[in-house]
């Protein structure tokens, strides 16, 4: 599923992404499996729902995020620290942080790796067309491990900075 998100970053602008039925056919033609396509479209649908419910409450500004037990189990300290880093440096606000956490927890993974979290952050930023500083974007695109290569690179940098 993460590979599909990266594919979408590289090939579509948020406003130019086709309708789900058309997108499913295009993803199938690109070689993705039907289970992964279904999971990715469901995940993206949840992201679209979050977009309409983003809260801009002034009470959320400067609030400290306390993670629940399940959140702590599924989002290791490195992920929680990275989210705090993004917020402290103004890359995300509290509502965007909550959208990132919600979408990360929507993954079927028992524990979300930092590399996967970075793809989630990119997906949320991409979907909301949120501007991000080039240095923060570099940090998002940096890979933490050699285990997984999602192909996130210069194409996404170009897309997100434009």
Image (cartoon, helix red, strand yellow):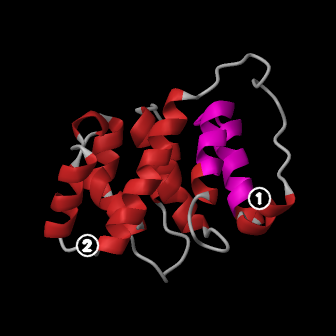
Q: Position of residue 17 (x, y in %)?
A: 24, 43
Whether residue 105 sits left or right of residue 74 in the image: it is: left
For residue 18, the mark is none
Q: Is residue 20 inside the magenta stretch? A: no
How packed mark 1 is, by other alpha carbons closer than 10 Å (few <14, some 14-19, many 20 or more), is some
Q: Position of residue 48 (x, y in %)?
A: 45, 39
Q: Is the residue 153 above or below the residue 54 in the image?
A: below
For residue 71, the mark is 1
Q: Position of residue 149 (x, y in %)?
A: 40, 75
Q: Position of residue 80 (x, y in %)?
A: 73, 56
Which residue is at a point 23% across and 46% down the rendered structure image?
Answer: 12
Q: Is residue 85 inside the magenta stretch? A: yes
| Helix, strand or loop: magenta stretch | helix
- Considering every residue shown, the one lying at the far top of the view is 58
Is residue 152 among the parts visible in the rendering?
Answer: no
Judging by the rendered image, the residue that carries numbered circle 2 is: 32
Earlier-in-chain disc, 1 versus 2: 2
Which residue is at a point 79% across and 27% down the rendered structure image?
Answer: 62
Whether residue 16 sits left or right of residue 51 in the image: it is: left
Q: Which residues are magenta?
A: 79-102
Quadrant of the frame with the N terminus: bottom left
107 vs 117, nearest the viewer: 107
Q: Is the residue 73 above or below the residue 71 in the image?
A: below
- Considering every residue shown, the one lying at the far left of the view is 29
Please tell me whether mark 2 sits on a helix, a strand or a loop: loop
Q: Is the residue 109 above or below the residue 6 in the image?
A: below
Quote the CA–CA distance across marks 1 and 2.
Answer: 30 Å
């Amino acid at each position: 599923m993460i590979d599909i998100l990266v594919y979408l970053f590289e090939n579509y602008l948020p406003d130019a992404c086709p309708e789900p039925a058309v997108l499913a056919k295009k993803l199938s033609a690109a070689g993705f499996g039907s289970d992964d396509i279904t999971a990715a479209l469901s995940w993206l649908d949840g992201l679209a729902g979050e977009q309409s419910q983003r809260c801009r409450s002034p009470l959320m500004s400067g609030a400290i995020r306390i993670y629940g037990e399940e959140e702590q189990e599924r989002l290791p300290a490195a992920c929680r620290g990275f989210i705090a880093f993004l917020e402290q440096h103004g890359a995300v606000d509290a509502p965007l942080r909550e959208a990132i956490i919600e979408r990360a927890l929507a993954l079927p993974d028992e524990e979300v790796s930092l590399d996967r979290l970075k793809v989630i952050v990119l997906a949320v930023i991409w979907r909301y067309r949120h501007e991000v500083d080039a240095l923060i974007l570099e940090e998002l695109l940096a890979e933490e491990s050699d285990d997984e290569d999602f192909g996130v690179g210069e194409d996404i940098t170009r897309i997100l900075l434009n």
